[in-house]
Image (cartoon, helix red, strand yellow):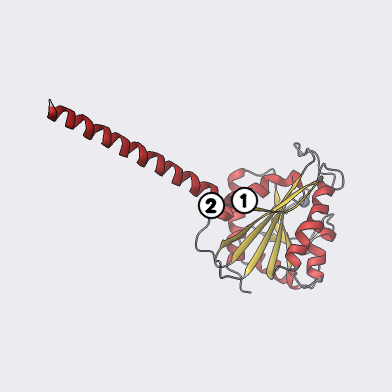
Amino acid sequence: MLKRRYHLILLIIVIIIACYAFVSINQMAHQDNSTAIKHELIGNDSSGSVEVIRNIGNPNGKKIAYVVGVHPLENDTHKNLLKLLPKLNNLNYSYDIYIINVSENFSSYGQLHPDDQPGRQTGQELALKYVYPQIVNGSYVLVIDVHAHGGAYGEYNTFVFCPVEGSSGESYARNISQNSINISYYNPNHTTSGPYLSVPLNQHGIPAIYFEENSYISQNIKESHMLELIQTIDNLNF
Ligand SMILES: [Zn+2]
C-alpha cells in the first residue's frame, strides 16, 4: 500500500516536470521568433509609417541600407528581400532595411502608368520625410532602393542603375552588374521616385542605386535574383 502511494507521487512529480519543460521550451521558441527581427518605428503620420530593421549581418561591418516600399504596388519584390536578407549568415557588412508602409489601399498591381498608381506619391513623400534624413546621417557606404516593374523595359527584366551618372553610385551599380550573371545595368533615364531619395543622396555623396525586378516572372527566379543581388553586394569592396 505504501509502495503504491510512493509510485503515484513519483508519477505525479514526473508529469509536473514534463509539463514545465514543455511550456518552457515553447516559450523559448516563441521568444526567439519574436525577438529575431525587431522593427523600430522611425516615422508615423496620417499618410503612413516608416520602420527600420537594424544591424542584420556583421555588427562590425560597414553599413549598407536597403529601402523597400517607396512604390507600394511593387511589394512582391520588397517581400522577397525581407524574407531572404534577415536569414542569411556570415554576411560581411551590417544591413539596415527601411520599410515604408502607406495607409492608402494599394491591393491591385494595375497597369504601369508611372504617375498614376495608388500609394505611389505617398510612398515617395514618406521616403523623403523619414528615410532620407536617417540615411544622410547614417554613415552608409551604399543604399539600394528596391523596386519592381511590369515588363516595361524590353529585354531588361532584372537590373540596377544609378540615376546620377558619373557618381560613385553608378560605379557600384556597374560593378554589381559585372559581378553577377542575371543582373544587368540599365538606366531608364526616367524615375518618378529619384528626386525623393536616390538623387539627393547621391548629390550628398552617398552612393544610392535602384534595383528593379520584373513582377511577372516566377517566384523562384525572383528569389534567386534577390539572393544574387544580396550576395554580390556583400562581396563588393568599400
Ligand atoms: Zn518603383
Q: Which mark is residue 93?
A: none
Crowd rating for badge 2 (residues with CA inside 10 Å; few <14, some 14–19, many 20+)? few
Please tell me which of labels 1 and 2 falls first in the chain.
Answer: 2
Amino acid type at image mark 1: Leu
Alpha carbon separation for disc pair 1 and 2: 13 Å
Q: Which of the two residues, 125 or 144, is positioned nearer the viewer here?
A: 125
Horizontal and vertical percent position of residue 112? 81, 44
Quadrant location of the C terminus in the rendered image: bottom right
Which residue lies under the disc numbered 2? 36
Q: Residue extending furthest right?
A: 115
Q: Residue at x 82, y 55 (%)?
A: 193
Q: Residue at x 83, y 58 (%)?
A: 196
Which residue lies under the disc numbered 1? 82
Left or right: 159, with 225 as reference point: right
Quadrant location of the N terminus in the rendered image: top left
Q: Residue at x 78, y 48 (%)?
A: 152
Q: Is residue 151 visible?
A: no
Horizontal and vertical percent position of residue 215? 70, 45
Q: Which of the two residues, 63 or 47, is positioned nearer the viewer here?
A: 47
Mark 1 beta carbon near ligand 1 (under 8 Å):
no
Marks counted in the figure total 2
- Dot 2: element: helix
Horizontal and vertical percent position of residue 148? 72, 49
Q: Is residue 166 above or below residue 219?
A: below
The quadrant where residue 55 appears: bottom right
The quadrant where residue 56 appears: bottom right
- Dot 1: element: helix
Crowd rating for badge 1 (residues with CA inside 10 Å; few <14, some 14–19, many 20+)? some
